[in-house]
Each structure stands twice: as C-alpha cells, then as structure tokens.
Amino acid sequence: MRTLLKTIGIAAAGAICAVLGPATVAQARDWPNDKPIRIVFPFPAGPDFLVRMMAADLEEQLGQTVIVDNKPGAGGTIGMASVAHAKPDGYTYVVGFPGPSANYTNTYTGLPYAPLEDFDYVSQITHGDMVVVARADFPADDLGELLDYARAHPGEVSAGNPGIGSYGHMIELMVSEQAEAGLKIVPYQGTSPILVDLLSGSLDISIDFLSEAYTEHLKSGSMKALGIASAERNPDFPDVPTFQEAGVDLVAPLWSGVLAPKGTPDEVIAAMNEAIATFLASEEAQEAFARNYQRATSSTPEELQEMAVREEATWRDIIKKYDIRNN
C-alpha cells in the first residue's frame, strides 16, 4: 500500500512539475518565504483604507509582511501595468476595478497591458451598487414609472452622471437604448455638482454610485431612489427595485478584486484566495465595508475572471458606438 501511495505521489508531483515547472513548484511550496507581499492599489491613498484593513489581516494569517503600494496615474493603468509585467512569484498583486481590469480594453489606445490576458485572478473583494436617484418631486416613484414617463416625454428627462465614460454615463446610454427612453444625458465633473442640481430641481435624475453623498438625502426624503443596477436589491434600501425587475436587462454592480501577474502558481493563488475569503467573512470586515456602502464579497478565481470577461462584453458595443475614450 505504501509503495502504491508513493508511486501516486511521485506521479502527481511529476504532473505538477510538467505544468508549472520545477522552479515554480518549489516557489509555491515555500510561499510565503521571508519576503514582503505587495498589493498595488492603482489610485491615490484615501479610498484604499479597506484594502489596508485587508492587508493587516492577511499579515496575521500568512505570517508575512503585506504592503499596500499606491501607484496612481492614468486612470489606474500605471499600477495595473506594473503588476502585469511583474515576476509571477506570488509576492505581487493588484486591486482591479471594472475600468482598468476590463473596459479600458476598448476605451484606451496604446494600453501598456492586456486587461483580460495579462493577469491571473484571485478573488473579488467588494460589491457596490449603482443607483438611479431622482429629485424629490419628480413624477415617478420607481424605474418602471421613470421609463414610462421618459417615453411619453422624449428628450425631456435630464439624466446626470459623474462624467463621460463613467459607469453612470454608460448605464444611461444603455438604458436609453434598451428602454427606448430618450434620456437627455448630462455629464458632470464628479458627484458634487449633480447633488446641487438635483436639490435645486434643475436636474431630473442621476445614475451614480450609491454612496454617503446620496444616502443622506435618500433617508431625509430630499431625493428618492428609483432603481438599483445589481442582481439583488440593496439591503439598506430594500424597497428599491432592481433594473431587471423594471424590465431592463442590465446587471452592472461596481466591483473590485485582487489580481496577480499571469503565471502565478496555482497553489499560491489558492492560498491567497482562502486567506482573503476568511477576512471578508469576518464580522469586522462585513461591518467596515457596509459602513462605506459596499459589501465584502469573496469569489473563486474563476468567478472573478468570468466577471471581468462579462464586464468587457457588456459595454463593448456601447463604448464603440458612442466612441467613449479615456485618452
């Protein structure tokens, strides 16, 4: 029996070596060694505090230093490119978002990396909701009523978003096409001026990230939420229907996930995935993410990859039709 088990073990090791190579297998077996693990955040410091919280937890779980390295610039492409071209030894990762991880394939020319080809996928970490918000006295109380009103008043319903090429902008374009609603789309420079115009009544609706900037007004009644662009209703606003419930075939959550350079050993990715999932399942993480209007959400590597592929496919035609460019 021992001889049989030994033979099976040798065969399995040989198969792994054939796929990964002897050096890579040795790296995976010894990981993490006496070397810091680096997680690149491709934007400035500030919005990275949840990632830093995750890094601190990973340090405890893995017994190794975990550093969050801010590499901002060019819409996240500088940080993404630095990881795409890094050594795939399990010590370098990047936090990916829908644009840099998928949609920039179609919005950037001369991109220094291939978003869907140059990375291995580790785990999703956040889920955020895009919401349709209307001024308090707008004559519709849900997304279905909004679309009916817009069809009856083509070109009259003004729809704000945080900027050309933003998620809100692309959702408005798709909704306007799918529902034949004829929205009057108005790009702004960020959320703050949108709020001013919604409160003054000079703007009808906005499609934007459901953040504290909106929730305060939604809870006070100075604005109202009409729809959520996710597969499920938001737990803080359970009475607000999803787009699909209103007949719009679109699921477009804001997500983020951890990616690694292509060729990172499978054993290392599995270990990182397990550690990230353990952190995200903790009560501390769940509460911290919820306070920032995000949901701590883990996934398998395969699920994150499917999400990125689906992301690019969802917006490809809209981006090309309206020639949406980041540069």
Image: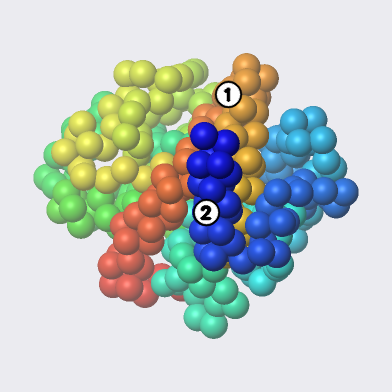
Taking the image as shown, residue 322 lies to the left or right of residue 194, namely: left
Locate the C terminus and report the quarter of the image it occupies.
bottom right
Q: In the rendered image, which residue does mark 2 sit on?
A: 11
> Within 10 Å of the Cα at label 1, are there few (<14), some (14-19), or many (20+) other Cα atoms?
few
Indicate the position of residue 158 as horizontal and vertical percent values.
33, 49
Sequence-wise first label, 2 or 1: 2
Taking the image as shown, residue 255 lies to the left or right of residue 311, namely: right
Identified by mark 1, the residue type is Ala
**Outermost residue to the bottom:** 110
Q: Nearer the viewer, residue 283 or 202?
A: 283
In what element is the residue under mark 2?
Answer: helix
Q: Nearer the viewer, residue 309 or 121?
A: 121
Q: In the rendered image, which residue does mark 1 sit on?
A: 281
Q: Gap between marks 2 and 1, in whole Å?
A: 36 Å
Identified by mark 2, the residue type is Ala
**Quarter residue 139 falls in:** top left
